[in-house]
């Protein structure tokens, strides 16, 4: 059964986030040969429409308005609902990001629709679209299908491989005028506390520190290693609570959930709350002085040693590999 599926492209600092392309790949599976329509909302974002097409969207609808310059749930909900009203889709896919987790339930409520959140896999099987999502802090997985109405889902970043970019693809990028009104809040300025560089939630490599880093300065070796590997720096709640770093770096049940190709845990004991945020990483390396640390139970590779000795050695070896590669 072919379907029309809308995909919300998420823009940050003038560029599309990778999860937008992953959402298109998921939408292709849901569409089963039907049409995938990208949606962009913001100020001066129409130029990004062709990139959604190059990653698999058949066409793109753009809602531009100066009231959409900064994300607000009121403004973006009005924009997306207007596109839904025009296109009458059978499916809708949004990234499971801070924006998506705020916006998707609101849209589902307005449409009286169900919502499958935090999907890590999408497949067509037995005449149904089957979504896989983690439960019990990632200890188990459940499979869900939509039996009636709109197929609406959010997809976790770094889990569904995007289609290869094809710069030869072409598709219509059309504008839709929407009168954004009755905003309960207007954001004048956004002050980012997160560090510059790779987006933690989408990073392929994450170097994370816990209480074992001992101080804010203790994160410097981790930052150097992350820079060499093109990755991002994260932290346990213990490190954040100790004021070694900002809470924007927190990974865990009450922080960000990450699923990188490589996760290196430095001085992290492995509390269950932290494991909930990173246990689905593809390869986990643990560095800890305590051989009985819980983190070793889920690690693919473990190094028992002082992180301040081990991390610099790793950094130097990776530098050598990069020179000879």
Image: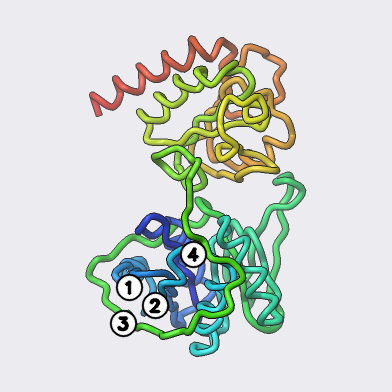
Q: Position of residue 73 (x, y in %)?
A: 59, 68
Answer with mark 1 or mark 2, whichever residue precedes in sequence: 1
Task: Judge the density around disc 4: few (<14), some (14-19), many (≥20) Cα neighbours within 10 Å.
Answer: many
Proximity of marks 3 and 1: CB atoms separated by less than 8 Å: no
Left or right side of 317 for 154? right
Q: Quadrant of residue 131?
A: bottom right
Answer with mark 1 or mark 4, whichever residue precedes in sequence: 4
The secondary structure type at the circle numbered 1 is: helix
The secondary structure type at the circle numbered 3 is: loop
Q: Nearer the viewer, mark 4 or mark 2?
A: 2
What is the number of the mark on residue 10? none
The residue labelled by disc 1 is 46
Q: Nearer the viewer, residue 78 or 232?
A: 78
Q: Nearer the viewer, residue 43 or 19?
A: 43
The residue labelled by disc 2 is 62
- Label 3 vs label 1: CA separation? 11 Å
Tell me: residue 193, above or below residue 306: below
Q: Nearer the viewer, residue 276 or 253?
A: 253
- Label 1 vs label 2: CA separation? 6 Å
Proximity of marks 1 and 2: CB atoms separated by less than 8 Å: yes
The residue labelled by disc 4 is 23
The residue labelled by disc 3 is 172
Answer with mark 3 or mark 2, whichever residue precedes in sequence: 2
């Amino acid at each position: 059964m072919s379907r029309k599926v809308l995909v919300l492209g998420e823009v940050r600092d003038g560029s599309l986030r990778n999860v937008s392309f992953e959402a298109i790949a998921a939408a292709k599976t849901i569409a089963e040969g039907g049409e995938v329509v990208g949606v962009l909302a913001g100020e001066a974002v129409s130029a990004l429409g062709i990139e959604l097409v190059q990653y698999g969207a058949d066409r793109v609808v753009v809602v531009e308005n100066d009231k959409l310059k900064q994300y607000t749930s009121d403004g973006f909900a009005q924009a997306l609902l207007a596109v839904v009203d025009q296109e009458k889709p059978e499916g809708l896919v949004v990234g499971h990001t801070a924006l998506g987790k705020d916006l998707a339930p609101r849209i589902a409520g307005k449409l009286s629709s169900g919502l499958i959140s935090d999907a890590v896999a999408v497949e067509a099987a037995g005449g149904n679209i089957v979504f896989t999502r983690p439960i019990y802090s990632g200890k188990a997985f459940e499979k869900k299908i939509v039996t009636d109405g709109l197929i609406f889902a959010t997809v976790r970043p770094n889990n569904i491989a995007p289609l290869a970019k094809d710069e030869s693809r072409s598709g219509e990028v059309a504008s839709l005028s929407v009168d954004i009104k009755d905003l309960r809040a207007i954001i004048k300025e956004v002050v980012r506390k997160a560090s510059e560089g790779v987006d933690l939630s989408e990073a392929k490599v994450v170097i994370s520190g816990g209480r074992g880093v001992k101080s804010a300065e203790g994160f410097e070796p981790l930052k150097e290693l992350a820079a060499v590997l093109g990755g991002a720096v994260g932290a346990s709640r213990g490190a954040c609570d100790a004021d070694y770093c900002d809470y924007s770096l927190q990974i865990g049940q009450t922080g960000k959930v990450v699923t990188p190709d490589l996760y290196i845990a430095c001085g992290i004991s492995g509390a269950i709350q932290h494991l909930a945020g990173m246990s689905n990483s593809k390869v986990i390396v643990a560095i800890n002085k305590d051989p009985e640390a819980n983190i070793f139970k889920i690690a693919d590779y473990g190094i028992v040693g002082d992180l301040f000795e081990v991390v610099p050695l790793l950094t130097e070896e990776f530098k050598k590999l990069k020179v000879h590669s």
